[in-house]
Amino acid sequence: YKYKVGSLDVTAVYDGIWRKPHDPAFIKDVSVDDTKAALAKAGLTTEFMPIPLTVVVLKMNGRTIMMDAGSGVGQWQANATHLPANMKAAGIDYKAIDTILISHFHPDHVWGLMEKGTNDPVFPNAELVVNATEYKWWTDPSRLAKLPEGRKPAGKRIAENFPKWKNWKLVDDGAEVVPGIRLMAAPGHTPGHSVYHVDAGAEQFLVSADTMYVPALLAPHPEWQGAYDQDGPMAIATRHRIIDQVIADNVRICGSHFPFPGTGSFVKDGNAYAFTPTQI
């Protein structure tokens, strides 16, 4: 799905969906009945927790820029394997991608950087940009012992392979990573989780990654703490800061797990928010 934001050409590419079975631990201290009620109010299925995954590709200043790399084929969820085919259908050649701006190192965002089995880089010639805090945290072998058991295999794969690659560009909060795009630290979901602010001329665009990763739940209940947030209270504070700024500045926003095509709008609703996804 292609759309414009100011002078920016955006292509939303669908990777697939995680039909996550309902789990009382998904949102801390919130029942499955309550999460189902939030899904129903948003007009979504209640049979499972729908977590779609969309990758956006930007064309600007002669560059082809991919925002995260998706989950890779057969490396995350059975129904999230569509990125390579959909990129081809959109007319985007993997070899033409010269820059990948990475939000964080969770598998659904970076397994697409690696070939299944060999762990060889899929994009050996693209510049891989990431918050230095995120890179250093995940590539420090001493961190592995502190990860929950379920996340240790992912942490091990990252720590053993990413440092071998020479095409990383590590940047700090506020850095202009390419002309017109600035990294903004948005920690909590992971230590170095980041969003990217794009100056598109007459409009502004924010690639928000997992700041608001299930808007049907977290827009009306921004205080809910997700199981995948490494620092729940920090993630909640970041969520409010980022979304409040988007609303105040009238910034167009996309999110990795928003309903496809992954973009929409927020308005304030008391201390919470109302989210309207873009319909296609």
Image (cartoon, helix red, strand yellow):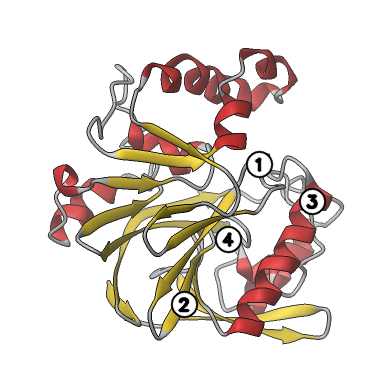
Query: Which residue position is annotated with label 3?
Result: 234
Residue 112 versus residue 26 in the image, above or below? above
Amino acid identity at mark 1: Thr
In-image side of 105 versus 230 (left or right)? left
Disc 1 crowd, CA 10 A, few/some/many (<14, 14-19, 20+): many
Disc 4 crowd, CA 10 A, few/some/many (<14, 14-19, 20+): few
Is 234 in front, or is 44?
234
Distance from Cα at disc 2 to Cα at disc 3: 25 Å
**x and y, in percent, of residue 121 in the image:** 29, 27
In-image side of 150 versus 236 (left or right)? left
Amino acid identity at mark 3: Met
In the figure, residue 104 lies in which quadrant? top right
In the figure, residue 279 lies in which quadrant? bottom left
Query: Which residue position is annotated with label 4?
Result: 47
Specify which label sits upstream in the sequence, 4 or 1.
Answer: 4
Query: Which residue position is annotated with label 1?
Result: 190
Distance from Cα at disc 1 to Cα at disc 3: 10 Å
Amino acid identity at mark 2: Gln
Task: Tell me the element at label 1.
Answer: loop
Amino acid identity at mark 4: Glu
Disc 2 crowd, CA 10 A, few/some/many (<14, 14-19, 20+): some
Task: Tell me the element at label 2.
Answer: strand
Query: Which residue position is annotated with label 2?
Result: 204
**x and y, in percent, of residue 170 in the image:** 49, 36
Q: Is residue 77 visible?
A: no
